[in-house]
Image (cartoon, helix red, strand yellow):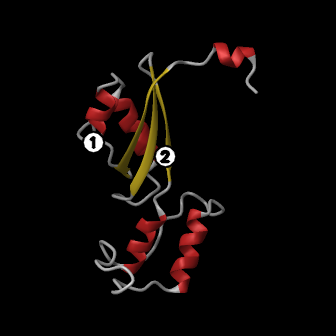
Amino acid sequence: MATLKEILTRRPVAATIRLTVPAGGARPAPPVGPALGQYRLNLMAFCKDFNARTQKYKPDTPMSVTITAFKDNTFEFTVKSPSVTWYLKKAAGVESGSGRPGHLEASTVTLKHVYEIAKVSSGSAVMERNFQS
């Protein structure tokens, strides 16, 4: 339960923005610019902070970002690791899945790949680790 001091010091939230941005590739161009600009947030501060946090990942790795915009034009954001489907596609060497699921196989993945993906995505592995296909 929140204390009275915590309740009184909460900042009113203007919006929660969810984006998928490539690691190390945040620029004030679409999709980042228009999404943050409509809430009058500092685009360059977000881009610098995001790129600094994601520099340990390979470039063009899709990262999910949840940005909490406050009414006083400040923001906080959390960066999530890439999705498991992205890791599976990378390990299989395909761009998309099968056109007819259950009938046609797009590719196969070895048990070693599945083990490495599970280890990386479980959170027990160090976040600096990149998937090596």
Query: What residue would you read off at disc 2?
Result: 79
Q: Examine the rendered structure and indicate whether residue 54 appears above or below residue 15.
A: below
Q: Position of residue 95 (x, y in %)?
A: 29, 72
Q: Nearer the viewer, residue 119 or 47?
A: 119
Query: What residue would you read off at disc 1?
Result: 31
Q: Is residue 72 left or right of residue 105?
A: right
Dividing the picture into quadrants, the one containing residue 16 is: top left
Q: Nearer the viewer, residue 50 or 6?
A: 6
Q: Nearer the viewer, residue 76 or 47?
A: 76
Q: Which quadrant of the figure contains the N terminus?
A: top right
Residue type at numbered disc 1: Pro
Dot 2 alpha-carbon crowd within 10 angstroms: few under 14, some 14 to 19, many 20 or more = some
Point out the tag, 1 or 2, that comes first from the N-terminus: 1
Q: Position of residue 130 (x, y in %)?
A: 48, 65
Disc 1 from disc 2: Cα separation: 16 Å
Q: Examine the rendered structure and indicate whether residue 18 appears above or below residue 9.
A: below
Dividing the picture into quadrants, the one containing residue 35 is: top left
Residue drawn at point x = 42 percent, y = 52 percent: 63
Dot 1 alpha-carbon crowd within 10 angstroms: few under 14, some 14 to 19, many 20 or more = few
Residue drawn at point x = 41 percent, y = 19 percent: 73
Identify the element where label 2 is drawn: strand
Q: Nearer the viewer, residue 104 or 124?
A: 104
Q: Position of residue 92 (x, y in %)?
A: 39, 80
Q: Position of residue 5 (x, y in %)?
A: 71, 14
Residue drawn at point x = 35 percent, y = 48 percent: 21
Residue type at numbered disc 2: Val
Identify the element where label 1 is drawn: loop
